Amino acid sequence: AVNSKGHVFVYHRMPVPLVEFDANGRFVRGLREGTATRAHSVRIDAADNIWLVDSGDHTVVKLDPNGQVLMTLGTKGVSGAGDEAAAAQRFNIPSDVANAPNGDIFIAQGEAGGPDPRVIRFTRSGQFVTTWSLAYSEGIRSNPHAIEVDKNGLVYVADREVMRIRVFQPDGTHVRDIQMQNPVCGLFIDRAGQLWMATGADGQMMHIDWNGKVLGYAGKRGPGLGEATEAHMLAVAPNGDGYVADPTGRQVGKVAQRERPSGPRG
């Protein structure tokens, strides 16, 4: 994730799980030593608060810019399944978190074959609003790996293995599916309202339109310079530079944008 200053935050599976670097890759600080079970996703909201998703202990934690805990959603070390469990903040393998324009919080859970793929919605203060299942009636396994919310409040869920972006109203009403040709591993909406996607084992960062058309991409699968063994999650800095987290390759890749986007955040 990248904050308003262009600093890059990496959430990884090490004793000090949250690490901050400046825009030039210089180490700034490490945070949260000994607190993570299975670090999975980090997001930064418009106020530079830091959101951490730990899929191992089934929690989502909100930190202020100094690293102090402001909110914890979920019950540490306790999982659950179904609507009732979600309402009681018992998640089952949370994968990602998104903040809506009105401050509502959306959590995707059930990646990696979890038994209860769903979205759970809370108010900005952490009060439960609603939840809906992402399971397919035809028996296809859903793997919700990332989640984003656009400027109109529409919810976009990355369903990785079926290579699909699923779009919902904030109340869970299904709008449409966008079928892609690559695994949909990470999603990001930048400040110019543009949609970006990370392709997992295909190793690419893609710029796509709202119908899934690929407008540009960077990278290919591999261990070399400019390549990613796994494009797991991604973020775009305020200046338009892109960052891809590659956990298999144990690196962060930076993609400099030749043209800087401008305009309101999506």
Image: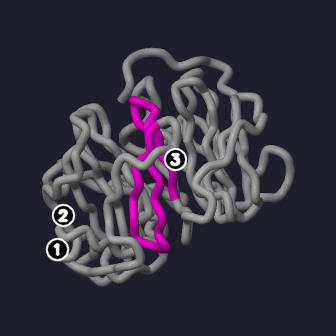
Q: Residues within 10 Å of mark 2 (few under 14, many from 20)?
A: many
* Front residue (pair 188, 47): 47
**The N terminus lies in quadrant:** top right
Say few, some or many: other residues with alpha carbon within 10 Å of mark 1 (under 14 / 14 to 19 / 20 or more).
Answer: some
- Residue 197's tag is 3
- Could you tell me residue 263's position as x and y percent? 42, 16
Residues tagged 2 and 1 counted as in contact (Cβ below 8 A): yes
Residue 131 marker: 2
Q: Is residue 225 visible?
A: yes
Q: Residue furthest front?
A: 68
Residue that mark 1 sits on: 83
Q: Amino acid at mark 3?
A: Met
Q: Earlier in the sequence, mark 1 or mark 3?
A: 1
Give whichever of discs 2 and 1 has the lower sequence position.
1
Relative to 179, 135 lies left or right: left
What residue do we see at 65% from left, 51% from top? 245
**Which residue appears at 48% of the width and 76% of the height?**
112
- Quarter of the image that includes the C terminus: top left
Dot 3: few (<14), some (14–19), or many (≥20) neighbours within 10 Å?
many
**Left or right of residue 177: residue 38:** right
Is 147 in the magenta? no
**Amino acid at dot 1:** Asp
Q: Position of residue 28 (x, y in %)?
A: 71, 36
The picture quadrant where one finds residue 83 is bottom left
Q: Amino acid at mark 2?
A: Thr
